[in-house]
Image: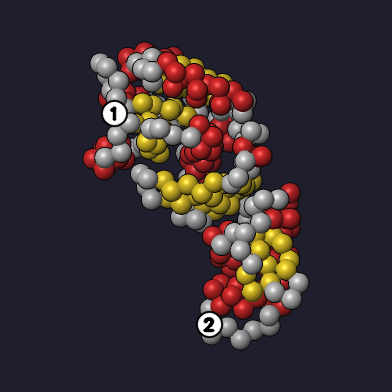
C-alpha cells in the first residue's frame, strides 16, 4: 500500500485516479490546486505525488519546486502537453516520471509502483508502504512495457515482477533478485523477446556471443537458476522440447 497525493484541478481526473488507486489498496489524498497541495505536503508525508502541470495559480512546476525544498517525495507529473520543453523542465526539477493526458489509469498505477521501487533501489529513504503496493487489478491484465519519456528508462512489469533494463535490476514486490551478470542478460533477452520461441542457438549467440564454444548445458543451468530465483514466476520460462525456451507472460 502506498500513500498518494493526487493534485489536479479537474475533479473527474482526481476521481478516476482515486478509483484505480483504491482498487489496489493505496491511500489517496486529493488537492484541487497547487496551493492546497503545498499546504498538505507541509503537514503530511506521502510515498508518491501525482501532480498535474497546468493548474490555475500555482502550476505543477512551482509546486514541485516548493515541495522539494523540504521533502524528497517521488513525483509523477501529468500534462495535456507533451512538449520536450515541459519534460526537460520537469526533469531539471527532479521529477521521476512524466505522463501525457489522456492516459491509461492502469498504466499510471504501474508507473506508481515502478517509481517507488526505483527510488528504493537507488537508496533513497522512502517508506516501505510504497514498495508493498500490489497490482491486484493488473494481474489479470497483459503485462506492460513502459518507456519512461523523461529519463528514457525502459521498465517491464508483469504482475509483481518488475524488470528494469536500464538499471539492470529485477524485483518481485519489494525484493530485489540477486542474479549473476549472465542471468541478467539471459532474462533480459527472454523478456525483450517474450512470447516468441527462441532456439538454443539464438539464446547462446545473443547472450554468450558468437565465439562461445563451451558446453551447451550451460544454458540449461542458467535457466534452472533463473526459474529458482523467479519463484512464483518460474513458469513464465517455458521449455520448448527440441527447440529452446520462451518467456510467456500470458501465464
User: Is 167 situated left or right of 225 in this image?
Assistant: left
**Image quadrant occupied by the N terminus:** top right
The residue wearing badge 2 is 210
- Residue in the picture at 64% in, 84% down: 214
Q: Earlier in the sequence, mark 2 or mark 1?
A: 1
In terms of secondary structure, where does tag 2 sit?
loop
Q: Which x, y percent locates residue 160?
A: 63, 42
Residue 148 at x, y percent in the picture: 41, 46
State whether residue 227 is above or below residue 200.
above
C-alpha gap between disc 2 and disc 1: 49 Å
Q: Which quadrant of the figure has residue 131?
A: top right
Q: Residue at x 44, y 18 (%)?
A: 12
Question: Residue 204 got which mark?
Answer: none
Label 1: element kind: helix
Query: Residue 50 appears at what percent x and percent y?
Result: 43, 28
Q: Residue 61 carries which label?
A: 1
Residue located farthest toward the right when viewing the structure as drawn:
241
Q: Residues within 10 Å of mark 2 (few under 14, many from 20)?
A: few
Camera sees residue 211? yes
From the top left corner, tell me how far across and down residue 22 is, in percent: 59, 23
Amino acid at each position: 500500500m502506498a500513500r498518494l497525493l493526487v493534485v489536479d484541478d479537474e475533479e473527474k481526473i482526481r476521481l478516476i485516479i482515486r478509483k484505480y488507486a483504491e482498487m489496489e489498496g493505496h491511500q489517496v489524498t486529493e488537492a484541487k490546486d497547487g496551493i492546497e497541495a503545498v499546504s498538505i505536503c507541509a503537514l503530511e508525508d506521502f510515498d508518491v505525488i501525482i501532480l498535474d502541470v497546468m493548474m490555475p495559480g500555482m502550476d505543477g512546476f512551482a509546486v514541485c519546486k516548493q515541495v522539494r525544498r523540504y521533502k524528497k517525495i517521488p513525483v509523477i507529473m501529468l500534462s495535456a502537453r507533451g512538449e520536450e520543453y515541459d519534460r526537460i523542465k520537469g526533469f531539471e526539477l527532479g521529477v521521476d516520471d512524466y505522463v501525457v493526458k489522456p492516459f491509461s489509469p492502469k498504466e499510471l498505477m504501474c508507473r506508481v509502483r515502478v517509481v517507488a521501487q526505483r527510488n528504493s533501489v537507488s537508496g533513497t529513504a522512502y517508506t516501505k508502504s510504497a514498495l508493498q503496493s500490489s497490482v491486484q487489478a493488473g494481474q489479470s491484465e497483459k503485462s506492460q512495457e513502459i518507456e519512461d519519456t523523461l529519463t528514457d528508462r525502459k521498465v517491464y512489469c508483469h504482475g509483481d515482477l518488475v524488470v528494469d533494463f536500464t538499471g539492470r535490476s529485477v524485483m518481485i514486490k519489494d525484493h530485489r533478485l540477486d542474479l549473476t551478470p549472465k542471468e541478467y542478460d539471459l532474462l533480459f533477452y527472454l523478456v525483450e523477446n517474450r512470447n516468441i520461441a527462441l532456439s538454443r542457438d539464438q539464446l547462446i549467440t545473443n547472450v554468450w556471443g558468437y565465439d562461445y564454444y563451451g558446453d551447451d548445458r550451460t544454458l540449461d543451468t542458467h535457466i534452472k537458476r533463473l526459474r529458482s530465483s523467479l519463484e512464483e514466476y518460474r513458469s513464465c520460462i517455458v521449455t520448448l522440447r527440441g527447440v529452446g525456451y520462451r518467456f510467456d507472460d500470458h501465464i
